[in-house]
Image: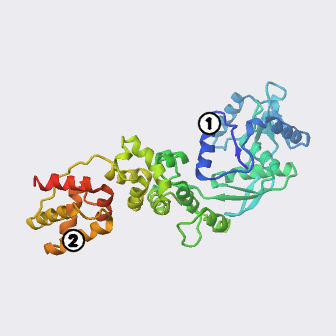
């Protein structure tokens, strides 16, 4: 069930909600019910808050914000932990708009057996009276999620361990409503490479930004699942395997560190095994944005098949593909020894008539190398540089096949005739 917690009106915008929905859809995480929006359930929260007042577990708070701010400032000045003072608050009874506060027990402890961290307990004396409903009728986070969890029959609450301090407050509300407690599990936070909590300054912060950077959704899912959880030494696993293998017993208690290089490596593995047609559909818009006319080169799927092992993201895949579609930029020409120049001229003549397929091109290169008395690198390296303008490419016979006879011969002629 998808629930959108949108009671923070400054942060919850139409754009932020759309980003959640689009990000989940791109990752392939669908839902059976919802999305449910908390701001559409205000009447329900008010009803439950009134029940808590009637049962003696909550009360109306008329204390003005200015008075509360002044109280907290005084407490801080005395070196005390800022907190609501129920006795002082009661002095404002019946004056102005009222919030609704939970009447927190003042003695004893509240605790639970966390499915990741083990037993956790808090003294009630450390918890002040939590606001359940603000004066405008909007619930606070801790109240809204408890009501939702009860109404939606939530069995497990699994969230970041920055929520540990919220859990005792929520347990009190569950118990006051005589509702069954869900199981709680607080997973470790994700840290950046510098050991600090992952934030905007560490790079991409939205799921959709990774889509724009050229990552496959299954690769990002794989990488995220592996943060703070493991299944032996398995690094690459399918969604189906994740569903089968995942359990809270193997979630680490220690923070996980997000490694962009590891994500790139995982994405590279998925690119290698992805269908060529799927990758071509992703690369095509990137190439068109660079002004490429795909009709001027070989079929894109064939190009993808040849170059996909050399890329870790879609833009890099496009970079590699540009070899077959971009305008040839003649880089500084290699200095050719007489033997290499003669061998390349012989090869040029042979390539005029050989069947234009990889095997025949490869045979022609090998025969020229053998007849010239040179070694393969002495012919293949300058050949690659002359024809592609690059020092590194996939296998040169495959590259020549895709470039096409006319383009290859033109580039050899351009270099060798003026050399």
Relative side of 315 to 14, left or right: left
Residue furthest out toward the left? 338
Q: Is residue 92 above or below residue 251?
A: above
- Between 217 and 276, the one lying in front of the other is 276
Picture quadrant where residue 184 is located: bottom right
- Between 285 and 128, the one lying in front of the other is 285
Q: Residue at x 66, y 58 (%)?
A: 186
Other residues around mark 2 within 10 Å, as few (<14) / some (14–19) / many (≥20): few
Q: Quadrant of the C terminus?
A: bottom left
Give the x, y percent position of residue 161. Answer: 64, 55
- Between 56 and 250, the one lying in front of the other is 250
Q: Determine if residue 105 is in view.
A: no
Give the x, y percent position of residue 309. Answer: 40, 62
Q: Determine if residue 212 is in view.
A: yes
Cα separation, mark 1 vs mark 2, equals 63 Å
How many numbered circles does the render carry? 2
Would you name the residue on which mark 2 appears?
Answer: 376
Q: Nearer the viewer, mark 1 or mark 2?
A: 2
| Mark 2, secondary structure of its residue | helix
Q: Is residue 390 above or below residue 231?
A: above
Give the x, y percent position of residue 227. Answer: 56, 61
Give the x, y percent position of residue 47. Answer: 86, 38
Other residues around mark 1 within 10 Å, as few (<14) / some (14–19) / many (≥20): few
Picture quadrant where residue 95 is located: top right
Q: Residue at x 57, y 73 (%)?
A: 232
Q: Residue at x 84, y 27 (%)?
A: 94
Q: Are marks 1 and 2 in contact (CB under 8 Å)?
A: no
| Mark 1, secondary structure of its residue | loop
Q: Is residue 67 above or below residue 353?
A: above
Residue 11 numbered mark, or none: 1
Residue furthest out toward the right? 54
């Amino acid at each position: 069930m998808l629930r959108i917690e949108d009671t923070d009106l400054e942060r919850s915008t139409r754009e932020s909600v759309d980003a959640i929905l689009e990000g989940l859809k791109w990752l392939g995480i669908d839902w059976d019910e919802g999305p449910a929006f908390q701001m559409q359930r205000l009447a329900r929260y008010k009803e439950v808050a009134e029940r808590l007042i009637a049962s003696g577990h909550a009360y109306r708070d008329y204390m003005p914000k200015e008075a509360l701010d002044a109280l907290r400032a005084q407490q801080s000045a005395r070196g005390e932990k800022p907190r609501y003072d129920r006795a002082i608050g009661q002095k404002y009874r019946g004056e102005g708009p009222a919030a609704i506060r939970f009447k927190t027990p003042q003695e004893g402890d509240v605790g639970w057996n966390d499915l990741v961290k083990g037993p956790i307990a808090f003294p009630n004396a450390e918890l002040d009276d939590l606001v359940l409903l603000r004066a405008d009728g909007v619930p606070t986070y801790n109240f809204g999620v408890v009501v939702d969890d009860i109404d939606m029959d939530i069995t497990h609450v699994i969230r970041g361990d920055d929520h540990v301090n919220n859990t005792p407050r929520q347990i009190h509300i569950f118990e006051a409503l005589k509702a069954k407690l869900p199981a709680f599990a607080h997973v470790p936070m994700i840290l950046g490479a510098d050991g600090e909590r992952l934030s905007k300054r560490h790079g991409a912060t939205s799921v959709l930004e990774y889509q724009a950077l050229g990552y496959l959704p299954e690769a990002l899912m794989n990488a995220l699942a592996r943060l703070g959880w493991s299944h032996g030494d398995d690094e690459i696993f399918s969604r189906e395997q994740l569903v089968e293998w995942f359990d809270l017993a193997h979630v680490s208690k220690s923070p996980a560190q997000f490694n962009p290089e590891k994500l790139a490596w995982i994405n590279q593995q998925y690119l290698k095994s992805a269908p060529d047609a799927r990758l071509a559909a992703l690369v095509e818009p990137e190439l068109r944005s660079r002004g490429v006319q795909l009709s001027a080169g070989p079929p894109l799927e064939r190009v993808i098949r040849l170059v996909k092992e050399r890329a870790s993201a879609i833009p890099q895949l496009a970079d590699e593909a540009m070899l077959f579609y971009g305008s040839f930029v003649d880089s500084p020409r290699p200095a050719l020894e007489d033997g290499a120049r003669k061998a390349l001229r012989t090869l040029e003549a042979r390539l005029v008539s050989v069947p234009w397929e990889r095997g025949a091109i490869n045979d022609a290169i090998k025969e020229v190398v053998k007849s010239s008395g040179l070694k393969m690198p002495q012919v293949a390296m300058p050949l690659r540089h002359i024809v592609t303008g690059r020092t590194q490419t996939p296998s040169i016979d495959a590259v020549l096949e895709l470039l096409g006879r006319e383009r290859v011969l033109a580039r050899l002629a351009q270099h060798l005739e003026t050399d």
